[in-house]
Amino acid sequence: MKKTFTLAFLSIAAFAQAQQTTISGFSSASAEKELQYEKQFDQSLSAKRIGETIKQLSAYPHHLGSPGGKAVADAILAKYKSYGLDAHIETYNVLFPTPKTRVLEMTGPTPYTAILKEPALAEDATSGQDGQLPTYNAWSADGDVTGQLVFVNYGLPDDYDQLQKMGVDVKGKIVIAKYGRSWRGIKPKVAYEHGAIGCIIYSDPKDDGFTQGDVYPKGAYKGEYGVQRGSVLDMVIYPGDPLTPYVGATKDAKRLDRSEAPTILKIPVLPISYHDALPFLTALEGQVAPADWRGGLPITYHIGPGKTTVHLKLTFNWDMVPCYDVIAKIKGSKYPDEWVLRGNHHDAWVNGASDPISGQSAMLDEAKAMGDLLKTGWKPKRTIVFCSWDGEEPSLIGSTEYAEDHAKELQQKAVVYINSDSNGRGFLGAEGSHALEGFMTEIEQAVTDPQTKVSVYERAKARDLVNASSVKAKKEIMDRKNVRLGALGSGSDYSGFLQHLGITTLDLGFGGEDPSGDYHSIYDSYDSYSRFKDHDFEYGPALASVAGRATLRMANADVLPFDFRSLYSTIAKYGSEVKELADQMRESTAMNNSLIKSNQFGLSYDPDKHLPQPEIKSEVPTIDFGPLTSALESLKQSTDKLSTEWEQAAQSGKDQDALNQKLYRAEQQLLSAEGLPRRPWFKHTIYAPGFYTGYGVKTLPGIRESIEQRNWIELKQQIDVAAKSITQLATYLSPPAP
Amino acid sequence: MKKTFTLAFLSIAAFAQAQQTTISGFSSASAEKELQYEKQFDQSLSAKRIGETIKQLSAYPHHLGSPGGKAVADAILAKYKSYGLDAHIETYNVLFPTPKTRVLEMTGPTPYTAILKEPALAEDATSGQDGQLPTYNAWSADGDVTGQLVFVNYGLPDDYDQLQKMGVDVKGKIVIAKYGRSWRGIKPKVAYEHGAIGCIIYSDPKDDGFTQGDVYPKGAYKGEYGVQRGSVLDMVIYPGDPLTPYVGATKDAKRLDRSEAPTILKIPVLPISYHDALPFLTALEGQVAPADWRGGLPITYHIGPGKTTVHLKLTFNWDMVPCYDVIAKIKGSKYPDEWVLRGNHHDAWVNGASDPISGQSAMLDEAKAMGDLLKTGWKPKRTIVFCSWDGEEPSLIGSTEYAEDHAKELQQKAVVYINSDSNGRGFLGAEGSHALEGFMTEIEQAVTDPQTKVSVYERAKARDLVNASSVKAKKEIMDRKNVRLGALGSGSDYSGFLQHLGITTLDLGFGGEDPSGDYHSIYDSYDSYSRFKDHDFEYGPALASVAGRATLRMANADVLPFDFRSLYSTIAKYGSEVKELADQMRESTAMNNSLIKSNQFGLSYDPDKHLPQPEIKSEVPTIDFGPLTSALESLKQSTDKLSTEWEQAAQSGKDQDALNQKLYRAEQQLLSAEGLPRRPWFKHTIYAPGFYTGYGVKTLPGIRESIEQRNWIELKQQIDVAAKSITQLATYLSPPAP
């Protein structure tokens, strides 16, 4: 066994040390040229310049619709133009609420009025500027409510199951939830579903405050007064402007009335600091919170309800504002109508040095480096499109409106959409469409980690090896040839491309050694970024080198480097997972119902607490996954055959126009016309943000969520829907009969 | 599958509802009489009287050597006599240190002098009494040390491994450790092994303070000033008086000089409240503590060392004090020289309403109920010996000295030793020798839980079913016929009997719904016990009913109800565990060494932190467990055969003197003459307190600890030692050839 390990390491090391000379999808001659261009590209990148760009673009608050936002868009436009790119701004007109009134007070047992304000710090040069958005959650309802308070942990469905077990109901009450574990918008939505009339979200120090490390400005973590702003739009229904689903929010677009927009929250919701949360939580009575609900404050966490009552009053300016997407193109020399898109947003909640300016600045350096290449006479085969999006923070508005507005053109022309957002020091994180695993492996092996000087591939693999919990898991990682791309949920600008249009997508960024409590606060500043996130800005060029390489290789490949065998094996794994999920749920439901009926729960509880019995749940029927299994079998056969065809094409040296078009439009076959249940905008049958997780992905979402929601009729339908789309892809990919 | 569950429940329910009519080891006629006596016994028990006894015996501080301690011993003696038992006090003369000087101060960066005092509370009537022992750890060294402070989590060997990974050394420093996760004496011992010159132990609110629930007197948990006293003797070498290992501490016993006593600590050690710990922890600098090290205080936990320096000065009165064991007998009518021992200590750190008076009071009610039976003419076949031990808190002194003093007689006469200690509301916990699993199952099915009115067997099983983490685990619990007895480590008065003399042992007590932060503090009082531990004292009679039944059945059985098949299957399970432990360690060592050699750890670490590489560990050789496997095979054969013999004897109705003697002395065959490595007092080859866990048991300790300590030479020896004792038992139990 030991010998095997040693050999495995030798082979990794040997691979990394050898100079890369071949690239999938490139002939030997093309590869030689491409590698030369990539070398020049890397040499153009500059950590210093990226640092300066971060400083420049985060110098003032620049949220959607603000003067600072317009200034940032204009600055980016000017940069693209100065690099020699063909750039312009596309403007959409979108709804964006900002606060008019914010009142949160404890009306009993002791009065307290929340301060709702992040103070300026001497150590943070931009923290005292004018023009900052107050602390709030965009898309909260206007409201003026008073009620008893209940602590609901992270405010997720499981937490309400736990409350039910403890006999606590939130109907007519105001809930207080911790930030974390899900996209924030899930918390007020689930609270509303359970009858709550208001929702407070606070940052517990256990999650991103003093429990995690020293707080700002001594360290990077969130201090006593730090508040996370953020959107609570019901983005899992559809992202983008709530008034213009499915269409671009152009000046003349047909709009919903605001009262009809299904993604706007129905109850008032407000984020607060733990300084403001502490008096409320201290006053709470009732049962002690379960062990895993307790945070880092020096109190006994109780659940309520009791004498603690809360008054929450919120009103908003529901304004229409311009949304400025900056688009810059480098026209393809051979296939101008095949587009490689590369995007990152530019709007921030406040100054946003990290989110999004760190990623934006790296992307701008990619554009600069390509501009330098252009000056040497280089031209990409395919068109490269840089997209600096506006309005990502409120609800992925700029990217979604662009995707909806240009839907038809994009489905014809877009080869891939490569996204990034915040960037920091550490390990490369790469997620996306699984046909690109081989492609990304080659890129990660070609880019050097700035601090350790090994490839970013080796560095991430070392972390995975060290962190893997078992020897078996470590061996699997050693034996793995390709990187694993995580599946995409939501939370950044790829949703419109991937989940609505079926365009192959990547999402890239470094992190893991960039501790953070500044997220969406006034302290996400240049001062904090340059101290705690990427002190020498070295991971800026690293991201530019990875994402730029991905862009260049896609733009220049002879045969597009899609390998659908990886997609097949990944979907097959998801298929096994959902089958196992159903089997486990069947077993555990039968067991639990049996334990409930025989009063085992009653006997196990503390008799002094008088807890209710758990509820009997519907038994899980036997489920026929046959259609899914057959569809996967077809996909396996056709992807195996396709890979033979692909190899032949790559070796032929001939133009592969038809094959290439087939490859890059393939992912669209995985869309279903009807979309997901209750959210038809989401059409991808393999990846979606979870209805109750938000950012967190659900793979085979129609099937998985039907099981989780115990909807057995819908499950049967969704097995058919997924099977149909997979079969569709299998048929589409099948080479023509010989 | 569902049907199976239902049937399983029906059978449990049916069993529980049926009146018990047979008892293992009793003929039908004997069983009928026995059950009648047990019914009378139960009727004599009184929750009200137990509550009164708790109030009486916890009315004043009564630690070893104190006037209150003498008064409690006298009161217990008087009770036994008043019940009609033949009672006397056996006095030993033992070393017992109490504090003379206690100084703990921070000398830098900011001065702080620890207050080292638990305040009296108006809500707790006895909390302001004179005669309380100050907060201290008995068997700390005298010392006067000053040094930098290092936070070491729980102060266990794994924590020092983690410190090494972080490049932190405690040599010449003072450490601060949290209470919990191990017996407290392990913490200063391991600190000393790593070169520390002093040790502070504090109670973190995450473990038994406000994080867990409301603090005393509002709730049961430990408040800001609560301190856990306790022994830090190196009890895993040997318990009892440190000056008289192996022999009773009689007046004329040969004694070690104190300086030679190996169990007395080498460095000063002091327990403190979190109020006193907070200034020190707040001042600490250096790296942030790993996530699972952080407690509940509202600070960022750092490890140090840094500018924080500590001065710790401790001196003690090293006095010889009398230790009063109260012994009460009921002479056996048929086998006066076969003893059933039932014990619970009576000394406390302060008032000790819970620890130990709740258990002591239940035991006294057993004696009272047996006294009542005696008055009706009943007599046990075997002699019953009640033992109210003194000096348990400092180091199991009273019981250990008694066991050593009467070693030879006990090994001849003792059928079983039945121990209890604190008692509270909730579920029965039963641990002990595995030949008694069938015996305990019958008893647990016969005793009713006072709050739910099902048997204590059903109640504990319900909890196990509900808490089991998987359907598979739940099914195993359903299918299990007998209760599982946990293996005994240490921490109460059974060690001398079980681990030194090889006497079959049980340890019993209720708990789980008796929240607690009062342990070893002045707040372990009648006021706190009657509010939070067992409000109506109902679990006093429940314990008396379980332990009394165990005593009565052992005293009256025709054929002693030992079933060594359970012992065999349990040891076989331990055998599989140690083999798997070695295999896993072999695999993980090879893997980790390989990862270290190829610099995977280095690449996975944050380059900014400059962490050292982990150390290469010795590879695990192939280990021959053959001798253990063969010994287990012999034991299986002989226990199977013995059970046939047992069945025939039980049905014969004849006297079974020889068989009974063989049965009750069998466990002594599992002793090894040489004892465990580096601690020859511990002679049991199957159960021992862990060398680095203290209370926590190590099963097959010689083998398991050799593996854990990577001592491959000793491992081979210890496999032979265990195999020899198991073979010895197998031969001993084999029925004579026909």
Image (cartoon, coloured by chain):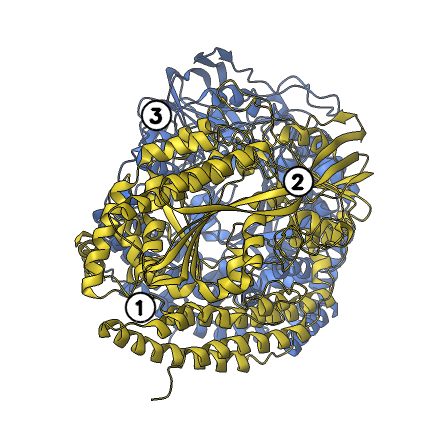
Chain colours: A blue, B yellow
Residue B532 bears which disc, if any?
none
x%, y% of residue A604? Answer: 32, 44
Look at the numbered discs 3 and 1 and tell me whether their residues touch, using CB distance below 8 Å.
no
Callout 3 and callout 1 share a chain: no
First in residue order: circle 2 vs circle 1: 2
x%, y% of residue B185? Answer: 64, 48
Q: Helix or strand or loop: what does disc 1 sit on?
A: loop
Residue B217 against residue B5 in the figure, above or below: above
Q: Helix or strand or loop: what does disc 3 sit on?
A: loop
Residue A168 against residue B718 in the figure, above or below: above
Callout 2 and callout 1 share a chain: yes
Chain letter of mark 2 equals: B
| Residue closest to the eye, A638 or B142 | B142
x%, y% of residue A215? Answer: 67, 31
Q: Residue at x 64, y 60 (%)?
A: A443
Residue B137 bears which disc, if any?
2
Q: Residue at x 76, y 45 (%)?
A: B267
Residue type for callout 3: Ala
Residue B559 bears which disc, if any?
1
The answer to which quarter of the image holds residue A556 is bottom right
Look at the numbered discs 2 and 3 and tell me whether their residues touch, using CB distance below 8 Å.
no
Locate residue A355 relative to residue B650 in the image: left or right.
right
Which residue is under mark 3?
A196
Q: Residues within 10 Å of mark 2 (few under 14, many from 20)?
A: many
| Residue closest to the eye, B120 or B14 | B120
Residue A437 against residue A548 in the figure, above or below: below
Q: Residue at x 49, y 52 (%)?
A: A413
Closer to viewer: mark 3 or mark 1: 1
Callout 2 and callout 3 share a chain: no
Residue B662 against residue B196 in the figure, above or below: below
